[in-house]
Image (spheres, rainbow, N blue to C red):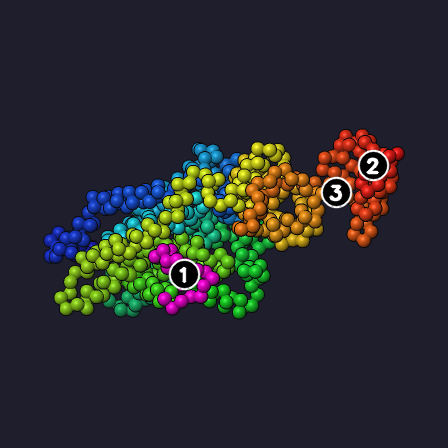
Amino acid sequence: MKAQNQTKKNVQTSQVKKKNVQKTPKSIAERIENLLNYKSVTVIMLAILSMAFFNNYSAIFDKKVNLNGDNIVYYSCGKAIAAGKGFTNTMGFEETPHTHFPPGYPLLIAGIQKVQPNDILVVKKVNGVLLWLSLLLLFLLIRKITKNTPVAFCATLFTAMQSSILFFATIMMSEMLYIFILMIIMHLAIYLNEKLFIKKSSWQSIVLFVLFLLNIIYIYLVRSVGLAMALTAICWFGFLAVQNFIQYLKEKRKNAETNSLPVLKSFLLQRIMICLLVTVSFFTVYKLWNIRQVNSGMADGSSYKGVFLRKTGGETMKTLDDWKERLKYNISGNITKWLPNKLYGTPYDNDAKITGGQWTKGLLTLLIFTAGLFYLRKDTFWLLLFYLGSSMVIVVMFPEQYQDGRYLTPLMPFFIFLFFNGIANIVKWICRLLPKKPQPLILQTVVLFCICTFWFYPDYVKAQEQLRETAKIKSWEKYNDPRMHNYLEACKFCKNNLPDSSRVITRKQEIFYMFSGYKKSESFPWYAEPDSVISYLKSQHATHVILDDWFRHAYVTLYPAVRNYPDKFKVLTVIGQVDTTTKQNPTYVLEFNDEWGYRGEYANGVKSGEGAELFQDGRKYVGHYENDLPNGYGVLYDAAGNVISKGKWRNGMFAGQ
């Protein structure tokens, strides 16, 4: 006991000495470093970063409903939860349990709906607030793990300016909530790794651990890729426990004064306990969610299994060569095109062959990232490596047709950090090689300032140009896209002229839902034959069809059915006109009735024999046909069933009784 007390006194004495040394810095760099760590300076930096964020965010904030269908699905699910319908699809003809997206973000939308019903702007602004809070946490996190304030400031500043991050902060998507929870988990993970909470007095640590567990579970329910964070927590604490165990055994074998053994044992037990509790908690929730999915009609419990196995042409991944081809395409694309585009704003052409210059830039970027991991503490080194590694495995395994860099967006704060930290570490290495050994902090600050001012800032502002221009347009009707304008006008027509009981078939169900006043609709098979399309419309009890030119599948699939069965479709409105220069077609809102048209005998493909025909105005002819027309005896009824003409017909004309 005395020995332990003496050890504590020695530790306290050494800490006092360190503090005394810090009070009398020997160099300008040390004075600057101490100054940057003052709380008042931290507050000023956070204020500057906040102003930079709000300046960029307000410039690109778009009040219009984003036309990405996924964000409307999130919104509709949130409305359903707020209305007490549960996690339900409400856009289709039948309300069914939703099984594609996880429920975490719709739960947030539901909470907002309770306060501000049907206010999309509030949902968008909440995403902006989540990004702002994430930036504050990012700055504190980077400074904590690097002890380098300039790196933390630069990385946070350009995260606040990164165009794709800003874009997702203005639409109703889950990326911002995911990034915010991710930052909380990172802070809590580092705290729990450093603090012992086995003692009874550490109740605060226990509370934080419970929050850590809840956030691990919730991040998976926000985005399925949150699985990467859960696996990271399990692997990281497990890895640290193994390290502690090895160190514990080494200390125990020394057979000397082992005052450090209780501490090592305490850390070992703590990390084992965290690893086990995270594993049990996460996989329990994971299993329960899969059971819910299966009970809701999903065969394997996950909507993403089928997505992962889908090839570009609609086929299924079957052979090892299929996976080799996908990994080759995705890995090379991420290195040479999509990641440089997100990090530097470098344009790319997905269809063009990868050039040597693209490979050079991509590989140099990876080297800078590698340098960015060096000089981190061993624990945070492995934490970032586990998370980025597991996340990128998921990204590169995703189908080729979805690879445009979108799924890199939640990872960009860390990639931007690794870039600036890599540059700072390279400068540090150079300083060590110089004869006079200059202080790295000053040179790092100068180099980072030059990169930010003359490279990153102009490119990041340029990358925002399209977002800024789009935000200035007050409504989508004024956007320079006639096909889109025609479709939205068709939705508006349905909103004003069709009853709520109408059952509309359209290519983009989500956009129709939002712009038609929340009317019900369903999509259609994209590559079906005309007879199959008619059968599908009949099975869905469809009343109306939108034939549009904005999404090509309508004219590919619906138009042949309309052309082959014109009697079953009645034109309610035509929007736009044929443009041979742009190969643009009009948009039609059609009424559909399977009862319309002819039912009877045929000969050589034409109406011949006894039959009946219901016309679109309600009239009905029953009688004999020849050469596709009424010929012979027949009766014509009006819409009320009263006889209009009864007798002989010749070539479709009544010839008398």
What quarter of the picture does the C terminus occupy?
A: top right
What quarter of the picture does the N terminus occupy?
A: bottom left
Residues at marks 1 and 2, CA–CA distance in whole angstroms: 71 Å
The amino acid type of the residue labelled 1 equals: Lys
Task: Check disc 3: other Cα within 10 Å, few if <14, some if 14-19, many if 20+.
Answer: some
Q: Residue 91 appears at what percent x and percent y?
A: 57, 41
Magenta segment range?
336-357
Q: Residue 360 appears at what percent x and percent y?
A: 35, 67
- Residue 119 showing in the rendered view: yes
The residue indicated by pointer 1 is: 337
Residue beneath the point at 20% across and 50% down: 36
- Observer-side mark, 3 or 1, equals 3
- Observer-side mark, 1 or 2, equals 2
Give residue 233's quadrant in the image: bottom left
The residue indicated by pointer 2 is: 654
The residue indicated by pointer 3 is: 597
Task: Check disc 2: other Cα within 10 Å, few if <14, some if 14-19, many if 20+.
Answer: some
Give residue 339's quadrant in the image: bottom left
Q: Which of 282 and 560 is in front in this view?
A: 560
Residues at marks 3 and 1, CA–CA distance in whole angstroms: 54 Å
Give residue 123's quadrant in the image: top left
Q: Residue 479: give its label.
A: none
- Residue 331 showing in the rendered view: no
